[in-house]
């Protein structure tokens, strides 16, 4: 964070503590960029970097009354950021202790051949074809394109709750179709 | 939920807040509260009969001074640890612990001296009454300090709770010094100093998770 950035963020935070919505929006978007860069520099590109960014923003929101406007903003902000990042790394390490990489499993535990995978993919594609066009579209955008519900709703012109309902029914239909072709629950 | 969604939700949830006062100012408020409530509790229990004579001794004065130092410094540290990024020098971190340990060392030295001249110096009676008194005296100041720490957003809740517990135990121990007439050093070491030494060690792991709640984000609605 440069001194100019810190000065700007300090002004935005002061206004945010008074309930100024646009200032708060600008503050969070400014901090989002700083946090993303910080996380990327510390842990590289990871799938959970965005989770850390969101955690930091939540924490800043909840702790915003603890920043004293007469004190510099950066130490307060970086203390929150560092604490959330350390927590995230700790959680990922804990999860990693219980997860086995697939190639480390003993032979026989996972014995899917390339042929079996191809068959499974074909069955899934066939099951997808049997869904309604709306269900297919929503599941493809959510799971293959990895968009959020909000983004899919925006893209398709549906409401968010409609997207959720269609996706839910689509998953249930997929499950029924795959169970009917001999797959386990 | 994307980060844009999070930002929008947080902006919608924005309410004006009153920034917390500086930890030093809050420590003064707490010190005043602790002095008043602790004083009332001591008055209710009744001052020890030999207080006038004992209070003039060097031993009592040194012990009381060490307890006051440990208590005030610990409360300041606890409140500083409740604020993210609040700078706390290593001297300020060490001072309350050093003062508490110095009190223990003083009692040990007195015990060693007493053991040389009396065979009953090691005879220990039951002092649970003193522990109960100390807890009663410390109850309101301790609860108040925990609330004040909880109003903050500690990124190191273990230390915040440990220092808060030390401050609360210090108030209790100081109050007991004014109410307990037992002159035996072993009694003071075990039943007066003991709880002060144990409470922060127990409170830190037990209480810390409660003060880390502010970091947890609300669960997103599941699809």
Image (cartoon, coloured by chain):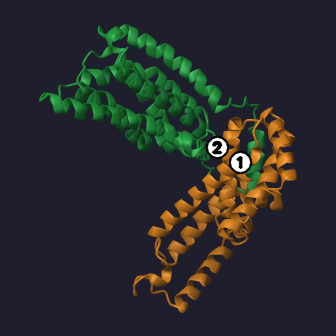
Chain colours: A orange, B green
Would residue B172 be visible to someone looking at this image? no
Residue ID for mark 2: B87
Residue B75 horizontal/vertical position (percent): 53, 31
Q: Is residue B219 above or below residue A172?
A: above
Mark 2, chain letter?
B
Along the viewing direction, whichever of A161 and B64 lies nearer the viewer: B64
Q: Quarter of the image for the C terminus of chain B: give it.
A: bottom right
Residue A52 horizontal/vertical position (percent): 66, 58
Mark in front: 1 vs 2? 2
Q: Are marks 1 and 2 in contact (CB under 8 Å)?
A: yes
Q: Quadrant of the rendered structure where residue B165 is?
A: top left
Query: Which residue is found at the position 57% from the left and 29% from the top?
Result: B148
Q: Is residue A167 above or below residue B125?
A: below
Q: Quadrant of the rendered structure where residue B181 is?
A: top left
Along the viewing direction, whichever of A129 and B213 lies nearer the viewer: B213
Q: Mark 2: which secondary structure? A: loop
């Amino acid at each position: 964070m440069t001194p100019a950035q810190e000065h700007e963020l300090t002004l935005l935070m002061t206004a945010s503590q008074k309930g100024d919505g646009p200032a708060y929006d600008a503050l969070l978007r400014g901090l989002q960029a700083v946090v993303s860069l910080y996380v990327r520099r510390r842990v590289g590109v990871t799938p959970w970097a965005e989770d850390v960014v969101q955690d930091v923003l939540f924490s800043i929101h909840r702790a915003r009354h603890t920043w004293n406007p007469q004190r510099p903003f950066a130490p307060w902000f970086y203390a929150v950021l560092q604490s959330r990042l350390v927590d995230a790394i700790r959680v990922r390490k804990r999860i990693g202790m219980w997860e086995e990489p697939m190639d480390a499993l003993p032979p026989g535990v996972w014995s899917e051949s390339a042929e079996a995978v191809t068959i499974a993919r074909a069955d899934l594609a066939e099951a997808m074809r049997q869904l309604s066009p709306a269900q297919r579209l929503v599941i493809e955008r959510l799971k293959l394109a990895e968009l959020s519900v909000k983004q899919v709703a925006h893209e398709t012109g549906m409401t968010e709750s409609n997207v959720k309902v269609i996706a839910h029914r689509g998953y249930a239909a997929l499950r029924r179709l795959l169970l009917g072709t001999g797959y386990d629950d | 939920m994307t980060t844009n969604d999070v930002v929008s939700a947080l902006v919608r949830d924005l309410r004006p807040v009153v920034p917390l006062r500086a930890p030093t100012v809050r420590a003064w408020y707490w010190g005043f509260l602790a002095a008043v409530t602790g004083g009332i509790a001591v008055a209710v229990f009744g001052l020890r009969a030999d207080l006038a004579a004992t209070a003039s001794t060097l031993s009592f004065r040194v012990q009381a001074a060490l307890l006051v130092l440990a208590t005030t410094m610990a409360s300041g540290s606890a409140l500083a640890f409740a604020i993210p990024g609040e700078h706390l020098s290593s001297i300020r971190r060490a001072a309350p612990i050093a003062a508490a340990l110095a009190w223990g060392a003083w009692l040990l030295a007195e015990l060693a001296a007493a053991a040389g001249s009396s065979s009953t110096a090691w005879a220990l009676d039951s002092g649970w009454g003193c522990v109960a008194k100390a807890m009663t005296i410390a109850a309101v100041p301790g609860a108040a300090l925990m609330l004040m720490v909880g109003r903050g957003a500690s990124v190191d809740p273990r230390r915040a709770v440990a220092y808060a517990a030390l401050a609360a135990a210090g108030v209790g121990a100081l109050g007991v010094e004014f109410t307990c007439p037992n002159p035996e050093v072993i009694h003071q070491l075990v039943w007066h100093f003991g709880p002060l030494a144990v409470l922060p060690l127990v409170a830190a792991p037990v209480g810390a998770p409660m003060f880390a709640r502010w970091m947890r984000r609300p669960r997103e609605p599941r699809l």
